[in-house]
Image (spheres, grey):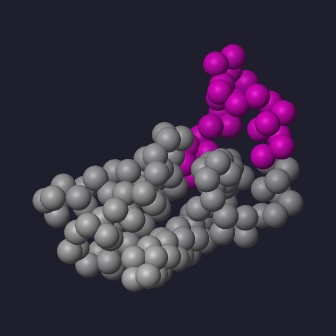
Amino acid sequence: MNAVFSLGSLFLVAFAAATIFPAQSEALLSALILKTDIAVWVLVAVASAGNILGSCVNWLLGVYVESFRNKKWFPVREKSFERAQAFYKKYGRWSLLLSWVPFIGDPLTVMAGVMKERFSVFLLLVSVAKIGRYIVLVWLVTEAASV
């Protein structure tokens, strides 16, 4: 498999996985760890960059989403939106350390934008969470492969 294609695919899948699109970057990263000779640190860097950038898009959407909140076509029900806001108010920026978790991580990154979390703080916490998740995944995959 061509390294440029592999890395490009990994970046795009990781980016999509951080947005509302259904994608699993962990599966592709695991396969690339096991089936290519691309350095693991390069794979982690590319996956992390795509995933973090996708979360940044979510944050940016959150910054502007509130202006559309009263529109009929708004995709989130009022009660769900208020519940998400209450969660973020309760747990604050530290909840962004869960931004890697499926199903809750993406809404958290959007809500951080809605709640006007400083981008520098957002970027730091999301980066720690997402890079940390990929490092743990690499460790699990390489341990399982060596058994």
- Which residue lies most toward the top here? 72
Q: Quadrant of residue 98?
A: bottom right
27 to 143, vertically: above or below? above
> Is residue 120 in view from this perspective?
no
Q: Which of the 4 image quadrants contains residue 100? A: bottom right
Residue at the limit of the structure toward the left, as seen here: 2
Quadrant location, the C terminus: bottom left
Please indicate whether residue 48 sits to the left or right of residue 96 in the image: left
* Image vertical order of residue 7 relative to residue 76, above or below: below
For image coordinates 13% across by 59% down, the residue present is 2
Tell whether position 56 is magenta: no
Q: Which range is magenta? A: 58-84
Q: Residue at x 65, y 33 (%)?
A: 67
| Residue at the image point whose x is 73% and y is 70% from the top | 94
Q: Is residue 30 visible?
A: yes
On the image, the x and y values in percent for residue 80 come to 79, 36
Q: Position of residue 128 (x, y in %)?
A: 56, 75
Look at the picture and state if 48 lies above or below 128: above
Horizontal side, residue 80 vs residue 63: left or right: right
Q: Quadrant of residue 5?
A: bottom left
Point out the residue furthest to the front here. 147
Q: For the N terminus, which image quadrant?
A: bottom left
